Image (cartoon, helix red, strand yellow):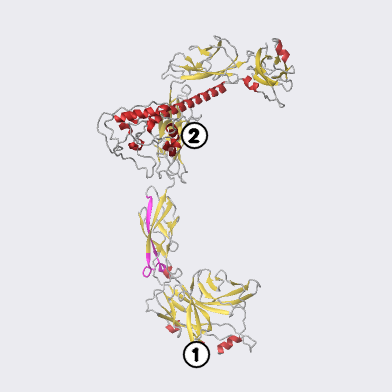
Amino acid sequence: APIKATCEDMSCKTGFPEDVHSAVVSRSVHGGQPLLNVRFRSCDGNKKIHFGSSEPEDFRVGEDGVVYAERSFQLSAEPTEFVVSAQDKETQQEWQMKVKLTPEPAFTGASEKDQRKIEEIIFPWQQYKHSSPLKRQKRDWVIPPINLPENSKGPFPQELVRIRSDRDKSLSLRYSVTGPGADQPPTGIFIINPISGQLSVTKPLDREQIASFHLRAHAVDVNGNQVENPIDIVINVIDMNDNRPEFLHQVWNGTVPEGSKPGTYVMTVTAIDADDPNAQNGMLRYRILSQAPSSPSPNMFTINNETGDIITVAAGLDREKVQQYTLIIQATDMEGNPTYGLSNTATAVIAVTDVNDNPPEFTAMTFYGEVPENRVDVIVANLTVTDKDQPHTPAWNAMYRMTGGDPTGRFTILTDPNSNDGLVTVVKPIDFETNRMFVLTVAAENQVPLAKGIQHPPQSTATVSITVIDVNESPYFVPNPKLVRQEEGLMAGSMLTTFTAQDPDRYMQQTSLRYSKLSDPANWLKIDPVNGQITTTAVLDRESIYVQNNMYNATFLASDNGIPPMSGTGTLQIYLLDINDNAPQVHPKEATTCETLQPNAINITAVDPDIDPNAGPFAFELPDTPASIKRNWTIVRISGDHAQLSLRIRFLEAGIYDVPIVITDSGNPHASSTSLLKVKVCQCDLNGDCTDVDRIVGAGLGTGAIIAILLCIIILLILVLMFVVWMKRRDKERQAKQLLIDPEDDVRDNILKYDEEGGGEEDQDYDLSQLQQPDTLEPDAIKPVGIRRLDERPIHAEPQYPVRSAAPHPGDIGDFINEGLKAADNDPTAPPYDSLLVFDYEGSGSTAGSLSSLNSSSSGGEQDYDYLNDWGPRFKKLADMYGGGDD
């Protein structure tokens, strides 16, 4: 009741509940470690508060009020103080609270009572209704600092500390703890006696998993009402040396150049220890246990015991002697204490890299080679060198440079990437008649410069002697091509020019060259095989299709008798000058005009294969004869190449007219010709287009149209022939079709099924060929096996029944039936006439009787056929033929 009354007397005040907040933390603080929780009271729950720290480089306050360490450091013996601020983001109002961090006391072996020194808790200020000044409330909670070693052996649960409140003397309180390790994962590590407030741990702790626990203690009465404000409890797990150092890699690889001076950095090895790195348990020290090989010194390297940096301590690294060193590195915690520290080892492999401390040296002072003349891309000599540096590295790869003997650049030296040899190669043709030998001076170098202080020896320079071999070379025409200007029209047998070649081989005994023609598209020329004189074999014509842009090209061949024989080609270019040897012609050859005066103009063009000045402008005129030409037509030149032909009279009858036109060019002398223009005169509409049929007929048919018409006629005839053949074949199949294919088709005892014949009186054209006696054909061919009459006839000679003609007259059907009856009477193999025959069942109620009851000896005139009228339209004709009375 007094507590309740006190709470009602307090008024709400926004801000920190206390001016100074004290907390005890571990001496070693890690970056990101939560240290304590500051509480801020907001009377208006909607305020947005931002927390800050006066030491942002060391401490950070989260939005939930938890204070975190920004970096790892060691707390001094004196309390560490800083200010936590809270600012309203909307009103910018600010509140401050001082935080005092006290390091945990070091373990000195004092009694448990001294270790559990009571921590003082400052509770919030409270304002009472009957008192205006603020009064500090008395501290209510007393808790000792909690430091718990990891890997404790128990027994569990192990009591840690008792939490109590000063009010437990007057009230019955219940205690509880919340947070990770209590009611949050990992749950159940810490428990509290709700009555006594005794806090206990239930199992061993592992600092490498969780270094500290942040719990919150609560005190409530029996009714669950909060008696004290919750307080933060930090449980620090004290580190034990229970983890060996572990190298990040079991094998470390590094390099160092040969010839390095002492103190040269090589590599860094790193090991980690899961124990506290700020304590001795996690402080590592490195050392080298062994070195292999031990030459030239057993201590070529040393290691920084704190950082793990490996450096050289002795001179004499030579890759050509020792290419690799293997070091065994040991890392020990407890600052390298060999007695109490835990150790682990790793291997450091240090490769000695090559530097260019060995120049390339030629294996000989002079190299020899030979090359045939006029050959390129030929290797004439191999230059071999030796180099003690590491193969296939820039310090070993050789480069060759010619320092003399090749002023014209006819040679180059390439490097074989596998053997490192120099390949002397010809890149420009060499003429034996000019140079018979070359002496080259060559120097060998590496891709990278030599190490400082090393010079090239004389062995890095050599000479190469190259001999040129004389070979038979091809003759060549001079000049090539050769240009000749000649007027067209040069007659056959005329000498045109002389086209000769030269032989470059001055030191070989050879006879004179022989000439032949290689290419002459128009076959106009021939060449003398001895002296190369070219004469014409036909008239040169500039207008030939083989002449392009007035130029005619012919190719000739010159051959020697060397070993092997060689030949060369030359091109003769004849530039043909135009002469006026072609008369102009009219174009087009056909035209169309109207039979009336307007519109009736025809545009024509003069074409001349010649060129200026033997072509246009042209003169156009009509001949004097026949007189009808000038009487009916007139022609007017409209430009140098074009003229216009039109009617002179008002009306000309439709038809086809040949109009001669005389065209004269401008050459000297002039050339003229009379060209016929076929003009089709027709009736025209207002637009000047022909409208009468005579125009189309008069125009005639071209070759393409005639061929198309003939193809159409041939295709039509083939289709008609195929149709006729198909009809003949169909009729033949119908005639060969047998009636006795099934027992129900027997003409002697059954009604035959015919095609639908229609039912009119006019339908008299019916086919009686289907009534032929089926026995005229082979029975086995028309009667399948198994389809037989039940009263099987005896084996006798087959009777000969009468055969109907293919197209019988309709009137002889009675004779056919009578003859069939007579043949049946004389057939010994026929069954008895009155015997019972088995046919397909046709159903009951049939109006037709059995055909076996007919008297074959009776005449047809005594039979009554009136019942055929009741059988439907298919038997209408039979009813008319036999059932019509006296008719």
Classify mark 1: residues with Cα within 10 Å, few (<14), some (14-19) or many (20+): few
Q: Nearer the viewer, mark 2 or mark 1?
A: 2
Residue 871 in view, yes or no: yes
Tell me the quadrant of the picture where the C terminus can be found: top left
Count of marks placed on residues: 2
Q: In this view, does 14 lie above or below 873?
A: below
Which badge, 2 or 1, comes first in the chain's sequence? 1
Q: Does the magenta stretch include residue 324?
A: yes
| Residue matched to label 2 | 760
Q: Which residue is drawn at 55% across and 12% down?
A: 538
Q: Position of residue 204 (x, y in %)?
A: 40, 75
Q: Position of residue 659 (x, y in %)?
A: 67, 15
Q: Give the range drawn in magenta.
A: 322-343
| Residue matched to label 1 | 169
Could you tell me which secondary element the residue under label 2 belongs to? loop
In this orientation, which residue lies closer to the viewer: 632 or 185? 632
In this orientation, which residue lies closer to the viewer: 202 or 491? 491
Quadrant position of residue 46: bottom right
Q: Position of residue 25 (x, y in %)?
A: 50, 76
Tell me the quadrant of the picture where the N terminus can be found: bottom right
Q: In this view, does 455 lie above or below 680?
A: below
Q: Which amino acid does label 1 sit on?
A: Lys
